[in-house]
Amino acid sequence: MQHSSLLLQLSPSSGEPIYRQLIEQIKRMIASGQLNAGDYLPSVRQLAVELEVNPMTISKAYGFLESHGDVSRIRGKGMMIAELAHEENVAARLQKLSPLAEILVQQCQQLGLNKQQTLEWLTHKLEKELK
Amino acid sequence: MQHSSLLLQLSPSSGEPIYRQLIEQIKRMIASGQLNAGDYLPSVRQLAVELEVNPMTISKAYGFLESHGDVSRIRGKGMMIAELAHEENVAARLQKLSPLAEILVQQCQQLGLNKQQTLEWLTHKLEKELK
DNA sequence: ATTGGTGTATTATTTATATAATACACCAAT
DNA sequence: ATTGGTGTATTATATAAATAATACACCAAT
């Protein structure tokens, strides 16, 4: 049994389906090396309790991750980060922020914000939360 | 008939429902003063063709905007930005980026990115698109 | 009064998501 | 072999979202 409490965290307001949020979040943690080949994901039932979500929703996410080669199903043990899964360099990880950046740009345009205003504000936001 | 081509733009990948994307985008353009009291929104049918979306999906968004007082339905003419609708100052508009910023922070944490790397990258992204 | 433009209601169908309650197949540990 | 932990399949229900095809009520312009 893993103690989990990964920094998995659902955003109910985002509109993005839960199972899809989980998939993307776990992929990011593999890319960053916070999850390494051989590590185990929290069990379906454990994560379902923790996130207050139906077990089958977790299983659905795990199923997708398995079918895409990110994790391997180890009978009796759980879902293990696949041996092929690899950490990615910073540039590749930044690239994964692109979809969000596109939305950010669009919202700034619609809000009539210029880059100086936006960057100042983002700087404050990020400094509070990131190291 | 308005020529429209507002900078309304749908993100199919975002998972957010279309009608809700429209609501939020139009609200942002009101807040920025790109849409002013008395302006007309593009007609339901026109926008439906332009965005390749069902007319009733547009109507659903317009209905929400009307019931929240953002636009007024003018029979025979279309949906007019309400007289009460007002432009907001920069701070208030920046505040509207908060939900996105929270998701950005979360993704950065999961990707193991620090604030310097992220800000450098965001700066480049924003400089290409924003004035 | 007719024409052509508004937005809207209706009904039906489809798809996706999430939940619920069971039950099952599998393996590790003992 | 039993126990208890994996993930999964099944069936049913509920909700939300989007599409489709019509039809309607309303008003402006002529």
Image: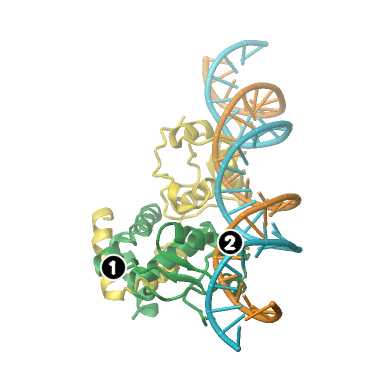
Chain colours: A yellow, B green, C orange, D cyan
Mark 1–mark 2 Cα distance, whole angstroms, equals 28 Å
In the rendered structure, the answer to whether residue C12 lies left or right of residue A15 reads right
Residue D3: image x %, image y %? 56, 13
Q: Where is residue A97 in the image (x, y as percent from the top left)?
A: 43, 63
A54 shown above or below A129? above
Q: Can residue A39 be seen in this view?
A: yes
Which quadrant holds the C terminus of chain B? bottom left
Q: What residue type is labelled 1?
A: Glu
Horizontal relation, residue C1 to residue B18: left or right:
right
Query: Which residue occupies 24% across, 58% down?
Result: A127
Q: What residue type is labelled 2?
A: Thr
Residue C15 picture location, percent across and down: 68, 52
Name above or below for residue A69 compared with residue A80: below
Residue at x 53% of width, y 34% of height: A44
- Secondary structure of residue under mark 1: loop
Q: Which residue is more in the foreground, B122 or D13?
A: D13
**Residue at 29% of width from left, 61% of height from top?**
B95
**Which residue does the numbered mark 2 point to in the structure image?**
B57
Report which quarter residue B125 is drawn in: bottom left
Secondary element at image label 2: helix
Mark number, residue B56: none
Mark closer to the chain start, 1 or 2: 2
Q: Mark 1 lies on which chain?
A: B
Q: Please tell me how many numbered marks the rendered image carries.
A: 2
Q: Residue at x 46, y 55 (%)?
A: A31
Which quarter shows the N terminus of chain B? Answer: bottom right
Mark 1 crowd level (few <14, some 14–19, many ≥20, 10 Å Cα): some
Q: Determine the chain carrying the residue at label 2.
A: B
Residue pointed to by mark 1: B88
